[in-house]
Image (cartoon, rainbow, N blue to C red):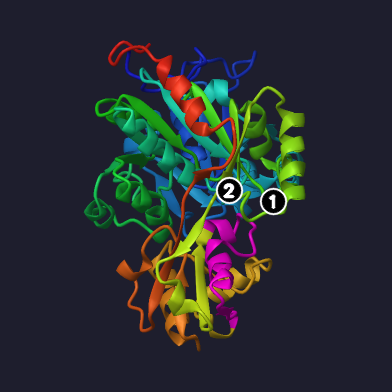
Amino acid sequence: MDSPQSKPIASDAGATRAGDRSGHRHRIVIVGAAGRDFHNFNVVYRNDRATDVVAFTAAQIPGIADRRYPISLAGGLYPEGIEIVAEAELERLCAVHHGDQIVFAYSDVPHEHVMHVASRALAAGADFVLLGPSRTMLESKLPVIAVTAVRTGCGKSAVARWLSRHLRNKGKRVAVLRHPMPYGDLARESAQRFASLSDLETNRCTVEEREEYEPHIAAGNIVFAGVDYAEILQMAEQEAEVIIWDGGNNDFPFIRPDLHITVADALRPHQVTTHHPGEAVARMADVFVINKVDSAPATDVALLTDTLRAVNPGAPIVLAASPIRLDDPVAARGRRVLVVEDGPTITHGGMAYGAGYLAAIAAGATVIDPRPWAAGVLHDVFATYSHIGPVLPAVGYQKPQLDALEATINGADVDLVIIATPADLTRLLHLEKKAIRARYEFAETSTPTLSEIIDAFVDRLPHAGSYR
């Protein structure tokens, strides 16, 4: 198969097109959050002489604006790179650069939020554009299984880890492609390979990146991520027989899947059709996994089942648990504890609490609200995400956030810290209190099982080396 470089499904993507019948060259602002926005540029606009991407805007992730998309990634049509500015600058960009198309390119936001951005674009005189799978998915020469979710925090990465172990047990070499998290030097992060914990140090990964990569590495997986997914895919194809796409937020895959597993959260049964592009992901699914049925009321599981069947009646539904365990539950019994939860799940994922809180309560601990000891930038986090319960979200995009996290934990009047982040924060922070970890994994609970579905998929694959 030819190189996948700039080769999405659609035959015209990346090719020179007439901007319109008059020969006008569309001037484009891509509205993003350091992920889907860069991918859309790479596969659709980078080599297109009929369009001019004048800027990216940045949202959701602190500190990713005021950079430039580097020349090495932007290509020959952009000898100075492309500026990245805060989304608040959208109207100014349209006025200064005469922008006539606004491309929306980030995920896990309410449908209403998307239309607010659309209204801003229209008021500025621009078209509002959403690029879909046909324009943006790359083709692989290997079989691809994608794991996505209708919301952040559904447990898709635990499903992806289970899937990798299951495939390895069947003798398959697996590569995990993770949704992008390029929060640092974009040129250095073009295509990254993580096979050991030392690779995380070498690449100066943030807490959020570690939360995604570290559990995969512990499970024996090699993880590929970065900015340029054509290059990333080529790297992964050299080492694997099967590609697993471990999606971020509720975005649809960057690589065309041969089997698409979408995870829904039984604790949030009303959120299948409320967020973008989670509803689209639900409608695209080949298989649904309803996760956390061990923690949710049976009525919510039934409601979620009915909703999924209504939007996508052809996809089989697998029920699954997300059992949580503490490393030392006896240590938590009767204690005052501070619970540190996965950051993205608790912030823009919209959850009041997560696995750590549930584990603490089950162990008989008293959970203490961290707000009285919140230090530095964590004051802003709690103010911005007022839905957060009595837990501490592990935010660590930059050093000031890590410093605030450490100061908050050390300053809290508690007996014990329960860390429920997928990454081991004790490797990054100097903690003055005893800390134990809460862990959670994927467990099948119903028929059909995901094992049966995956086994049937693997049995249909050609022999190694002959796929596609």
Residue 367 magenta-drawn? Answer: yes
Does residue 260 sit above or below 419 in this rendering? above
Mark 2 and mark 1: span between their CA atoms? Answer: 9 Å
The residue that mark 1 highlights is 268
Q: Amino acid at mark 2?
A: Cys
Q: Quadrant of the N terminus?
A: top left
> What's the residue at 59%, 25% (across, down)?
286
The answer to whether residue 195 is left or right of residue 154 is left
* Spot occupied by residue 269 in the image (x, y as percentages of width and height): 72, 47
> What's the residue at 22%, 55% (across, down)?
198
Quadrant for residue 326, please give it: bottom left
> What's the residue at 52%, 66% (across, down)?
356
Does residue 169 sit above or below 139 in this rendering? below
* Spot occupied by residue 91 in the image (x, y as percentages of width and height): 66, 47
**Total of numbered circles in the picture?**
2
Q: Quadrant of the C terminus?
A: top left
* Spot occupied by residue 90 in the image (x, y as percentages of width and height): 63, 47
Does residue 204 sit above or below 357 in this rendering? above
- Label 2 sits on a secondary structure element that is loop
* Residue density around tag 1, few if under 14, some if 14–19, many if 20 or more, within 10 Å: some
Q: Earlier in the sequence, mark 2 or mark 1?
A: 2
Q: Amino acid at mark 1?
A: Arg
Q: Are marks 2 and 1 in contact (CB under 8 Å)?
A: yes
The residue that mark 2 highlights is 154
> What's the residue at 59%, 19% (across, down)?
19
* Spot occupied by residue 315 in the image (x, y as percentages of width and height): 64, 26
Is residue 418 visible in this depiction of the protein? yes
- Label 1 sits on a secondary structure element that is loop
Q: Which residues are magenta?
A: 344-371
Residue 445 magenta-drawn? Answer: no
Is residue 76 visible in this depiction of the protein? no
